[in-house]
Image: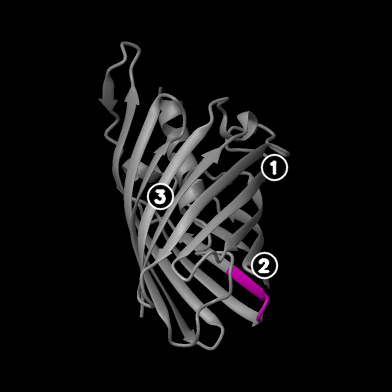
Amino acid sequence: MLKKIILAIALVATASFATWDKFPVLETHKGQVKVGEYFGMPNHEHMIDEIYAGARFTVIQNLELATLLNFRVLTIHETDDNSVEDDGITGIDNIPLMIRYQFMPILNAFLDITFPTGTKKLCGTDRHFEFHFGAQFSEKFGIITLGTELGLKMDTKGKDKKTGPWRLNIGAEGDISATDMLTPYLGLDLLVLLGEDQMDNDRTGDLGVEPYVGLLITFNKILALDISTRITMGEDYYRTDDVGMYFDVHLNINF
């Protein structure tokens, strides 16, 4: 049971702590706040619920800084007698600092540094840092704006003196400008592990597949609502043959 609980935590962390998006940075001295809720079912037995708030701001031309505060409200599982049991895993997740620099209108470089600031109940006692870096390419084709990302994530040695496997991620998203108010989008993220895990098991080549679809509803220049759903597949990567499902709804506030 403990392994399944840890799995649930790891899966939601994969989806929660990504770059802000795959598109160009905001204009100079422009910012955005997002506040939302994230609900997930990593497998048929577990459910998690989180609330979060994040902010990004372009401090100088082409340089954007961002961060995100994520709070796990609930982690529950279904028992053998079909009742629901609270696992008691709640608290603040590790906090990332996200940096993006736009070299040209179609190309960004990014670096995400995740600090071991989360509660031990949620993040464990290893206390390692994580680094995620890479490049993003985006281009507009008529009513479709395409955003792509290639990144690599690695972590430092924590208290257990071991690092996890590296993770290569390749992703693409297409936003369709249907109307001034409605922007449906769909995307796909591929995650590939490289190297050994903390138990010295070779995980090289383990593949996770995460397609997602969403809708951005823009009310005005300041306010927009983003609704999306994502599924996770990959028995070797996620250590389960279940298809995970996640739902996200958040409000974007531009300033």
For residue 55, which quarter of the picture?
A: bottom left
Quadrant where the N terminus sits is: top left
Element under disc 3: strand
Residue bounds of the magenta highlight: 105-110
Q: Amino acid at mark 2?
A: Ala
Who's the residue at 45% across and 61% down the image? 216
Residue that carries the numbered disc 1 in the rendered image = 195
Dot in front, 2 or 1 = 2
Q: Is residue 123 above or below residue 139?
A: above
Q: Which residue is mark 3?
A: 248
Residue placed under numbered mark 2 in the picture: 135
Distance between the Cα atoms at labels 1 and 3?
31 Å
* Residue 146 lies in the magenta stretch: no
Residue at 43 percent across and 39 percent down: it is 9
Q: Nearer the viewer, residue 214 or 69?
A: 214
| Left/right of residue 71 with respect to residue 19 in the rendered view | left
Precedes in sequence: disc 1 or disc 3: 1
Q: CA–CA distance between discs 3 and 2? A: 25 Å
Kindly state the secondary structure of the residue where label 1 is placed: loop
Q: Quadrant of residue 68?
A: bottom left
Find residue 185 and report its horizontal and vertical position in percent.
Answer: 55, 57
Residue depth check, mark 1 versus mark 3: number of the one nearer the observer: 3
